[in-house]
Each structure stands twice: as structure tokens, then as C-alpha cells.
Image (cartoon, helix red, strand yellow):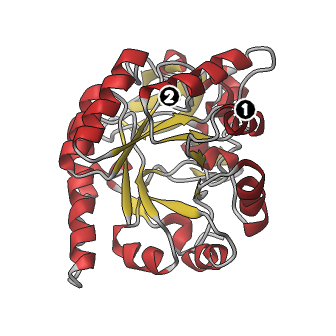
Amino acid sequence: MELVCPAGTPAALRAAVDAGADAVYCGFADETNARNFPGLNFSRPELAEAVRYAHRKGTKLLVAINTFPRAGDEAIWHRAVVDAAQAGADAVILADLGLIAYTADHHPDLRRHLSVQAAAANPDVINFYAETFGIRRVVLPRVLSVEEIAAINTAVDVETEAFVFGGLCVMAEGRCALSSYITGQSPNMNGVCSPASHVSYAQEDGVLAARLGGYTIHRAPATQAAPYPTLCKGCFKVGAREGYVFEEPASLDASMILPALARAGVSAFKIEGRQRSRAYVTAVVRSFRGVLAAMAEGQAIPAGALASLAEGQSATVGAYRKIWR
């Protein structure tokens, strides 16, 4: 079982490797990956050094190139694939059909993983990617129950990777377009969700209003922490009801059901959080390393170890137990 961990900076990568990650995923500092934020990601020399550091410690390095190229600008994304291969990356994580085809044609020996951004959630589509483009692993969307994952794994011959901790975005990956309705930018096309340049906060009669592109997304009493204003987790008034329309600002924490996911045939557990600090990365990776060790020894899984790191101090197992559908 592989523990796949995030790194938004070279320092976070070293922290993940040293804390016990089996594989670390990261991206270039441009729009070719879905976390294209200022101060994050890797230059070409930094990525090459990251590969050397990871490999010295026996850790794999995966490169996310998981946005969708703009027509006429494909060379930017092609260059990212070439540079990842030349740096010695163990795999690239892709979402766009054209980019996957390019990689399969020009770098057939470079291992290809299918990003969650591709939203492959049934055996037919997974087998299509595997048979047509040689995809070796699929990162499953966070819309599937454990039982559905088990059924998929019996019908496919590729590895599957499941998210187990971190931000829980609106549960239809590959369609993260809500942000673009207000800001003109989305994770799919630009690598950014609710970019900070469009975010503002204002005190109004004892209430903190969090705005995105001039629109109020969340209002919270001054004594409470206001979440980062993203549309999918915004608090809105619809008729007489006020609440979270799409998803609550809670983190995914599937640590207690890792044994069930393992029995369902999942090959790798993925931690989300390339925007997080190296202290966060260290704490989460060490905690999940401990969970995996407990599983291997047949011991009880320690509960609640990461409660303080959950978004809004609130965690859920999301669709894995499918109580929301």
C-alpha cells in the first residue's frame, strides 16, 4: 500500500519524504497544474533536485500536469511533460485526453496516472483510458462509496488511488468551474480556485463578510473564524433557509476506514494539501504512517489524531459512506 503525499514547495517535499511518504506529488510553477498559486510549486531546477532527494530516500516523485491546455497553447503543457520526464519523475498525473495521447505517443516509457480532474468513476471509462493510453493508475473522484470502489476494482486491471485526508472540494471533480463564474479563472483551465487577488474581507455591524470578486460568499460573527471564500463551500441564503448549498467547509478524514479501502482493492492512499505548510505535511504524513503501521500489525487505528488540522476543525468521511446522497 502506497502513501502518496503533497508538496507545494521544496521544503514541504523534504518534509514529506522525511516523514515517511512512499510517493510525493508536486507541480511546476505555472498553469499546468491545478494548484497554480503564488509562492507554490517548483521551478525546473527545483524539480530535478526534488527527484534526486526523493530517490536518495527511496521515495517516488509524481508530477501533476492536470489542467486542460488552451487551444493554441498546447506547447506549454507538452514542455511540462518533457521536463518532468527529463527530471526523472516516476510518473505524471494527467487529465486532458489530448495531453495523455501526446505523452503516450512521445514518452511511452513515462508512467501515466489519471488525475481526479478527469472524473473517471466507472469501469468503462477507466478501462478506456487504460487500453487506449496505457494509464497505470487512476485517482478516484471523491463521489464513490467503499462498496462502489470495490466493484470498480474487480472490473479493471489498473491501480486505483483514493483520497484519505485534506480539503474536500465539491464532489464532482473535473467540473471545478464554479470559481470561473465570478473570477474568470478555474482549477481546470488556470489551475486556480478562488484566487487570492479576488478575495476581500470586511467588518459589517459585527459580522465578518468574506467576498470573492465583490460577491459576499460567507458572513460570520466577529468571534468566529471566517473560511476562505470559495463558491462550492459558501454559505448562502436560499429562500428562508441559510446554509451550505454544495458542501460544508469540512476536511476529508478517512483514516478510520483505511482497512475497508484496502479490502476494496485500493493501491494507494492520497493526502491532499499542496497549499499547506511543511509542518502540516509532516504531521499528516507521520499520522498516516502510524495508521498504516497499526493496520500492518493488526492493531486498532488511533482516532482523532488530526482533528486540529481539519478544515474548520470539522472532518467527514464524505461519500465513502454516502450518507449525503
Residue at the spot 53% in from the left edge and 75% down from the top edge: 321
> On the image, which quarter does residue 82 sit in?
top right
Q: From the viewer's perspective, is residue 200 above or below residue 113?
A: above
- The tag on residue 191 is none
Taking depth in this image into account, of 300 and 101 the one nearest to the observer is 101
* Mark found first going from the N terminus, 1 or 2: 2
Residue 187 lies, with reference to residue 273, above or below; the image says: above
Judging depth in this view, the residue of 238 and 168 nearest the camera is 168
Q: Amino acid at mark 2?
A: Ala
CA neighbours of label 1 inside 10 A, class few (<14), some (14 to 19), many (20+)? some
Q: Is residue 68 visible?
A: yes
Q: Amino acid at mark 1?
A: Tyr
From the image, tell me which residue sits under label 2: 84
Whether residue 130 sits left or right of residue 258 in the image: it is: right
Along the line of sight, which residue is nearer the eye, 284 or 153? 153
Residue 240 placement (x, y as % from top left) = 67, 53
> Where is residue 173 shown, x and y percent of the image?
65, 48
The image shows residue 144 at horizontal and vertical percentages of 61, 68
The image quadrant of residue 190 is top right
Quadrant where the N terminus lies?
bottom left
Seen at 59% across and 45% down, the residue is 112
Residue underneath mark 1: 102
Q: Is residue 35 left or right of residue 79?
A: left
Answer whether residue 280 is visible to the viewer in this image.
Answer: no
- Is disc 1 placed on a helix, strand or loop? helix
